[in-house]
Amino acid sequence: MKISDSQKKELQNAIKGEVLIPGNDKYEESRQLWNAMFDKKPAIIIRCRNKKDIAHAVNFGRDNNLLIAVKSGGHNSAGTGSCDNGLMIDLSPMQNVEVDAENNIVKAEAGCLLSTIDAATQKYGLAVSSGMISHTGVGGLTLGGGFGWISRKHGFSIDNLLSAEVITAKGEIVTASASENPDLFWAIRGGGGNFGVISSFVFKAAKIGTEVLSGPIVKSFDDLKEYMQFHREFVRTLPDEMTINMVVRHAPPLPFIPEKYHGKLVLLLPFVWLGDPDEGQRIIQNVRDCTETIGDGSGMYPWAGWQTAFDELNSHGARNYWKSHHITDLSDGFIDAIIEYALKFPTTECEMFIPHMEGAPSRIDPAATAFPHRKTPFLLNIHTRWRDSSDDEKCLQWVNDFHKATEAFAKGVYVNFISNEGADRVKDAYTAPIWYRLTECKNKWDPDNLFRINQNITPSNHK
Ligand SMILES: Cc1cc2nc3c(=O)[nH]c(=O)nc-3n(C[C@H](O)[C@H](O)[C@H](O)COP(=O)(O)OP(=O)(O)OC[C@H]3O[C@@H](n4cnc5c(N)ncnc54)[C@H](O)[C@@H]3O)c2cc1C
């Protein structure tokens, strides 16, 4: 669709933010997504400054029959933050954060990056449970679940969500909380951007202080099997204060990794301990002692700094394809598949990310939110990452083969780690009763599927 000058002018007069069409300054910048696999060109971008702007945008999109995509941080690996020839609602100008330090409550506008929230909350030693890469957006991350370094202790982002302001498909501004529109509140905690556009989130924050014992310990790839056989039991005995994740990849040239390992396959073991540092050191020594430690970058780090530790390895602009599963057990067969496919990494930027997920989230009733797969202890996220489009075919082949090879050890998937894998794959993020309930909510809040540029929950009456 081509937006006429008069349409643009009328819209611009009605809102505080900016209206952009192809050729305008900032149009190119605003349409960018994290994943360079997607080069979508919306017919119009509305850069919203407040909830009323969002309501105008939703009304404009609906009344003009436009596809509507919503962008917070633009990180979704499936490229759902934008669309071709439709309307992109760009929330990135909305980055205000209010901290009520007395009550540990944080209100964050939906365009915030995680770094913006960390910067505001850390002034008070607080942190909102969220993700591990600071340039991710709070919008998509929260609506899918949101896990990171403190979620084993404090719950997922959705477990700390107290309320949200939602602009519905009708353009109405409503509150979703335990007491107001509780069905909507339930659905947005795991059901993604299917039910409306969130303008702000209110979270309970955790008092974690400003420094944490954290850092990566590095192991040789040759010892991977022995280490993983230890890890699969060991981490499951740990208090929730300790989170140790695994990353299999080619070693980046970091100062604490001996040069001879740079560019070689290694196992990184980043961890965070939220307690007395001496106690944390005692626990993590078990990891250092199991198989040879070839690098150790751990120490007391400022929380906000630690949150950026892996930003560079996940920077914008590369081509990416993510595929994932929740994993029931790091069995020997699973470990063998990890070794086999690591040896076949199609590029040196690919990695296998295997976080330990159990803790506070697994003690929450799986039906309490729309994130039911809470009890699987591990997750595998296959980060396939490359630069050159001529490598597309070999990279996609590798990730699909590897994903299939690990299916036998999997149960369900995290909705935020799904790529464009078809409508049926979305259902794997849920269980049948949760899917049914989500569909009911979709029928009520978005019966015409206005919000469909996402991992879509299709209304049951929709043709
Ligand atoms: C480098 C990187 C690191 C990551 N690390 C983690 C991690 O540690 N933990 C974790 O849980 N996840 C992580 N993720 C996954 C992340 O949660 C998803 O990619 C998420 O969709 C990103 O949110 P976004 O707002 O940046 O993305 P966007 O692409 O802007 O949004 C994704 C989708 O969310 C919906 N959406 C976003 N904002 C709104 C809103 N305000 N209202 C309605 N719908 C909205 C839309 O449907 C949109 O298509 C990571 C992703 C990347 C790329």
Image (spheres, rainbow, N blue to C red):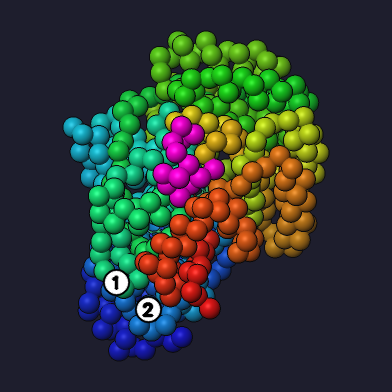
Q: Main secondary structure of the magenta part?
A: loop
Left or right, residue 208 beside residue 458: left
Q: Does residue 264 appear anywhere in the picture?
A: no
Amino acid of disc 2: Arg
Q: Is residue 284 magenta?
A: no
Q: Residues within 10 Å of mark 2 (few under 14, many from 20)?
A: some
Amino acid of disc 1: Gly
Report the residue at 30% width, 89% height from top.
Answer: 6
Q: Quadrant of residue 26?
A: bottom left
Q: Is residue 371 magenta?
A: yes
Report the residue at 30% width, 65% height from top.
Answer: 167
Give the magenta-colored segment's residue range: 361-373
Q: Which mark is residue 301?
A: none
Q: Secondary structure at mark 2?
A: helix
- Please tell me whether residue 299 is drawn above or below residue 2 in the rendered image: above
Q: Position of residue 291 (x, y in %)?
A: 71, 17
Dot 1 and dot 2 residues touching (CB under 8 Å): yes
Q: Nearer the viewer, residue 279 or 442?
A: 442
Q: Position of residue 304 (x, y in %)?
A: 39, 34
- For mark 2, what is the residue? 62
Cα separation between marks 1 and 2: 9 Å
- For mark 1, what is the residue? 171
**Upstream in the sequence, badge 1 or badge 2?**
2
